[in-house]
Image (tube, rainbow, N blue to C red):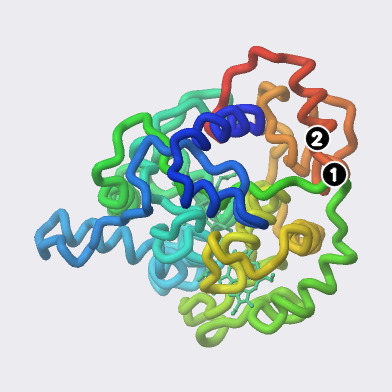
Amino acid sequence: MTYPTRLALFVSVAALLSAAAWQACSAGDAPQAPTAVTNQHPWTVPDINTLPDDTWGKTVRYGRDLINKTSTLIGPEVRDASKRFAGNNLDCQNCHVEGGAKEFGLPLVGVSAKFPSYFARTGRVGTLEDRIQGCMERSMNGKPLPIDGAEMTALVSYMKFLSTGRAIGSDTFGSDAGRIKELQRAADPVKGRTVYANTCAGCHGNDGQGQRNGAVGDAKGYLFPPLWGPDSFNDGAGMDKLINTANFVHSDMPEGTSWKNPVVSREDAWEVAAYVISQPRPAMANLDKDYPNRLEKPIDTPYGPYADTFSAEQHKYGPFGPIAAAIRALDANREQPHD
Ligand code: HEC
Ligand code: HEC
């Protein structure tokens, strides 16, 4: 969702929220502009243990396992070469935290209510399956799943289960990773390096390569995932965009952090995110083909071409305010894309 829309929603949402919830949202460093509250709130997630062990229950549980143990089931090191769909040893839940069930932890709760929808990245309407393939090819640096295979069916089934009771077309409060206030200047990777050393390296390693559960080749994935390098997400991934990464860090890092009690300050979240995205990672081909309507390109997309004249550097690290203003001036009536 784009910045102006969110801002507009924020104003209307503020009126809907109870005084207490409003305080939680506006207090200090908590995410500033949550998505619309057109759904259940407080956060609710259906309990997978209530499902019987029938065909549907088994399929939903296989989907849950694919999110939690992606590396073990479809990673590049699995014994059955025909199942090596992911290109790195990440698990979906390294980003879609707690099996995709965590509020502002990039949850998968409610996603079945969102798709099909217009994708700015392709300029077409895409399905939930298409969106999953996006993460397979970018976040997982891999190949698309067979569209009619057991894995895709299970993932979509698990997401439908997680979306139980969410009305089609409604927004889910707590989806994505929040929206902390932007800095009025560029985020600084040099400052971020110090934040990283003090707050992140203990788990993710001084070299950002994380810590494996076992040994290279055993398909057991990571205890602490790598943040850059050859076994990380590629440069076309959502997590390689500053706004996503800063919000994720603020709402979810270190491990176990809740968006209601952030550990990393707002400013440090921007700096450390800048440091993470300044590091090397696998390159995706043909990124220049993304966002055929350049006016719809998210302001923090680190690769061109752009509709505006701002540098790739400013698109990567900010400040974003002037870019957003320039885009608004270029086309006030553009279609509001989903992502
Ligand atoms: C490195 C982090 C990362 C990993 C790993 C990852 N994703 Fe994502 N995913 C994201 C981000 C960030 C977004 C949000 C939007 C964006 O791309 O800007 C997202 C969005 C999604 C969405 C759409 C959610 C919405 O609310 O619209 C789905 C569905 C999804 N991912 C599925 C998966 C699946 C399935 C896997 C594993 C096969 C996976 N993702 C692995 C980072 C990741
Ligand atoms: C206590 C250990 C711990 C600390 C400290 C920690 N992380 Fe994480 N991080 C994790 C774990 C575990 C995950 C996987 C998601 C989860 O289970 O919460 C993760 C996931 C991530 C991800 C998404 C997955 C990926 O591979 O990119 C990013 C980005 C990230 N952390 C950045 C940071 C940053 C930046 C800091 C410092 C501000 C930090 N983390 C501090 C444990 C930690």
Q: CA distance from mark 1 to mark 2?
A: 7 Å
Give, as a three-letter code, the residue at label 2: Gly
- The quadrant in which the C terminus is found is top right
Is disc 2 surrounded by few (<14), some (14 to 19) or many (20+) residues within 10 Å?
some
Q: Please give the label number shown on residue 321.
A: 2
- Say which of 149 and 57 sits in front: 57
Outermost residue on the front side: it is 19
- Say which of 208 and 140 sits in front: 208
Tell me if label 1 and label 2 are in contact, CB under 8 Å. yes
Q: Is residue 121 visible?
A: no
Is 28 drawn above or below residue 70 in the view shown?
A: above
Query: What secondary structure is found at the residue carrying circle 1?
Result: loop
Location of residue 27 (image quadrant): bottom right
Q: Is residue 170 visible?
A: yes
Q: Position of residue 302 (x, y in %)?
A: 77, 44
**In the rendered view, does 7 fall on the left or right side of 256?**
right
**In the rendered view, does 133 fall on the left or right side of 246?**
left
**View quadrant of ligand 2:** bottom right
Residue visible at 47% across and 50% down in the picture: 21
Residue visible at 50% across and 58% down in the picture: 105
- Say which of 278 and 2 sits in front: 2
Task: Give the total of numbered labels.
Answer: 2
Q: Position of residue 54 (x, y in %)?
A: 9, 60
Give, as a three-letter code, the residue at label 1: Gln
Is disc 1 surrounded by few (<14), some (14 to 19) or many (20+) residues within 10 Å?
few
Residue wearing tag 1: 184
Q: Position of residue 140 (x, y in %)?
A: 55, 57
Q: Position of residue 57 (x, y in %)?
A: 17, 59
